[in-house]
């Protein structure tokens, strides 16, 4: 179907479970300050494929464990609360992007999440790097939703526009809105923090427009992260970094760090 409005697309996304129930439960657990890792385990266990991937991640050579981690509880203990939350939500959503662009979107999400974290470090911790990485991981969630709601249409747009075109303009022409607006609307609906939704909404806003709109540093970090994740076209990187007082050397450092972080399992 071709959704006629953002509201219609959000409802269709819900119907199609673009945001699985397990992910919603994980989010609730994380928001509740009284939650324990056992609550998190219960929420994650609802989704067998996510559980399996978490166990696999905990066994990755990155962590250098001498023994094999065989169950979900041990995996969660090792990964910790916040990393588990970030991993599980991302695997349950972006990790299930349907169609031929699934792997591309997954790689772009990982690269953007890593770049957002690296930028946070480069600007000296003014922005929460865990939250920025999650925003980077989820920045293109609107594409994922469109792939579920209008698979043929969005797949065609991606094929024509992903590498070098103007995906946003093409989406606006087809739907009357773009994946950044839709992604933000979905994240709000699913009760993610409003800072996160706001950053997803503006991840394609040009640097000069951002300067005029006096956006928050968090939004600039996510827009810059999305640009840095695409090594063939980093147009705008300098201008974005200027908005958060990140000089050329700092930017270079962030690019190098991002490459290292990308290979770490979230
Ligand atoms: Fe995007
Ligand atoms: Fe992207």
Image (tube, rainbow, N blue to C red):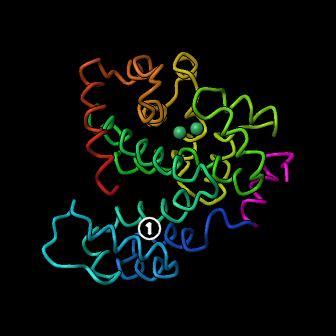
Magenta span: chief secondary structure? helix
**Dot 1, how many residues are within 10 Å of its Cα: few (below 14), some (14-19), or many (20+)?**
some
Indicate yes or no whether the magenta region holds residue 13.
yes
Q: Secondary structure at mark 1?
A: helix
Nearer-the-camera pick, 18 or 202: 18
Can you see residue 216?
yes
Q: Is residue 13 left or right of residue 56?
A: right
* Picture quarter with the C terminus: bottom left
- Reply above or below: 249 against 139: above
* Picture quarter with the N terminus: bottom right
User: Residue 249's spot in the image, x, y percent?
Assistant: 24, 20
Q: Residue at x 27, y 25 (%)?
A: 252
Q: Is residue 202 left or right of residue 17?
A: left
User: Residue 122's spot in the image, x, y percent?
Assistant: 26, 32
Q: Residue at x 29, y 18 (%)?
A: 247
User: Residue 246's spot in the image, x, y percent?
Assistant: 31, 22
Q: Residue at x 26, y 43 (%)?
A: 260
Q: Which residues are magenta?
A: 1-15
Q: Quadrant of residue 52?
A: bottom left
Tag 1 residue = 30
User: Residue 24's spot in the image, x, y percent?
Assistant: 57, 69
Nearer-the-camera pick, 263 or 120: 263
- Reply above or below: 151 against 217: below
């Amino acid at each position: 179907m071709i959704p006629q409005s953002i509201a219609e697309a959000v409802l269709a996304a819900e119907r199609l479970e673009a945001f699985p129930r397990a992910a919603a439960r994980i989010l609730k657990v994380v928001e509740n300050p009284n939650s324990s890792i056992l609550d998190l385990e219960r929420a994650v266990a609802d989704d067998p494929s996510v559980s399996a991937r978490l166990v696999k991640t905990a066994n990755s050579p990155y962590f250098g464990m001498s023994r094999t981690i065989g169950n979900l509880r041990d995996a969660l203990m090792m990964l910790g609360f916040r990393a588990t939350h970030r991993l599980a939500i991302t695997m349950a959503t972006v990790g299930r992007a349907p169609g031929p662009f699934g792997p591309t979107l997954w790689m772009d999400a990982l690269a953007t999440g890593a770049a957002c974290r690296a930028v946070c470090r480069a600007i000296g911790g003014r922005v929460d790097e865990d939250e920025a990485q999650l925003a980077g991981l989820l920045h293109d969630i609107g594409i994922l939703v469109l792939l579920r709601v209008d698979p043929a249409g969005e797949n065609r747009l991606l094929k024509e526009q992903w590498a070098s075109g103007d995906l946003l303009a093409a989406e606006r022409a087809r739907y009357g809105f773009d994946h950044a607006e839709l992604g933000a609307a979905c994240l709000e609906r699913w009760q993610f923090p409003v800072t996160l939704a706001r950053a997803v909404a503006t991840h394609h806003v040009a640097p000069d427009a951002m300067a005029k709109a006096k956006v928050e540093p968090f939004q600039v970090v996510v827009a810059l992260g999305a640009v840095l994740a695409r090594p063939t076209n980093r147009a705008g990187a300098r201008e974005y970094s200027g908005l958060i007082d990140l000089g050329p050397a700092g930017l270079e450092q962030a690019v190098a760090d991002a490459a290292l972080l990308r290979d770490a399992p979230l």
